[in-house]
Image: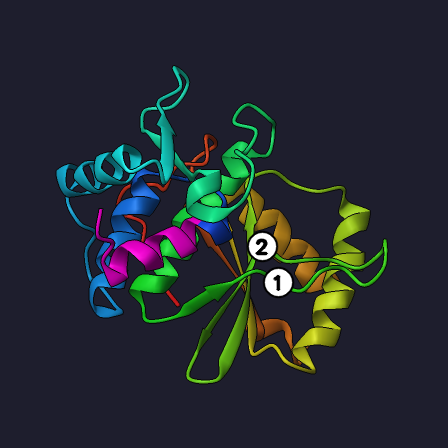
Amino acid sequence: MQLTRRDEQMLDWLNVVRMADMDGVRWALAALKHGHADNPVTTRRANQWVARMAEAGLVERVRPMYRNRQIVWPTYAGAGRTPPALFRQTMRHELAVAAVSARYLAKGYEWSRDRRPESPRDHQGDGLAARGGVVELVEVELTTKKLARYRVIHGILGQRLNGELAAVTYWCTPEVARVVDREADRFVFRDQRNRLVTRGVFDNQGRWIEGSAFAV
């Protein structure tokens, strides 16, 4: 099968995010066609792309009983990595990261993984979104951390906001967003506070709340 440039870009993106549901696939397909998109492709178009890649042995797919959408991930042939663990506790988080990542692509950003932690107390974000030389660290938070951990994380983020980062954005449930904001008010320096923002866009199952704007 002849792969198009967008096919290759989609497989590269899936390799970075590891897995995605059809919400993420729809937005990524739309974004990678022209480098930006105002709307996702249709579910039918996304299903056709997934079916074509699955037939070529480049992706696998499953629709678990507890999810209302297919989950897609690259095969070893497609990405050179082993399949993800679909039933581990972090799966919901990884799918939410993919949904956010795809929407950044639709706004013309490039998406990459954050750098690895430099020590056990260091913190790795969920991704980096870059556009025009400006880099934003992205966090996806569906459940709250221990409050003491926020003090450590916000201290690290403050140091990075003095360096390579222009902003930090948390994409959360509305409840978690309130906690992150409260702890940021306590631990982020006043002159940096407006560069750490929260967006309450996910429900408790990690699904994008219909009608929630993607504001960047």
Q: Which residue is depicted at the point 52% across and 27% down?
A: 86
Amino acid at the residue labelled 2: Asp
SS for callout 2: loop
Q: Which residue is mark 1?
A: 114
Residue 177: image x %, image y %?
54, 49
Q: Residues within 10 Å of mark 1 (few under 14, many from 20)?
A: some
What amino acid type is highlighted by mark number 1? Asp
Q: Is residue 113 left or right of residue 20?
A: right
Residue 199 lies within the magenta run: no
Say which of 79 and 156 sits in front: 79
Of the numbered discs in the image, which one, if any, rests on residue 216?
none
Label 2 sits on residue? 126
The residue drawn where x is 42% and y is 69% is: 110
Q: Nearer the viewer, residue 122 or 213?
A: 122
Q: Is residue 121 above or below residue 144?
A: below
Total count of labels: 2
Rendered-image quadrant of the C terminus: bottom left
Crowding around mark 2 (Cα neighbors within 10 Å: few <14, some 14 to 19, many 20+) is: many
Is any part of residue 120 visible from this angle?
yes
Q: Residue at x 78, y 50 (%)?
A: 149
Q: Residue at 41% of width from left, 18% of height from top?
A: 66
What are the residue bounds of the magenta stretch? 1-14
Q: Quadrant of residue 109?
A: bottom left
- Whether pointer 2 and pointer 1 mark residues with C-beta atoms closer than 8 Å, the reply is yes
190 w.r.t. 9: above or below: below
Q: Foreground: 203 or 130?
A: 130
Q: CA distance from mark 2 to mark 1?
A: 7 Å
Question: Would you say the magenta stretch is mainly helix, strand or loop?
Answer: helix
Q: Is residue 12 magenta?
A: yes
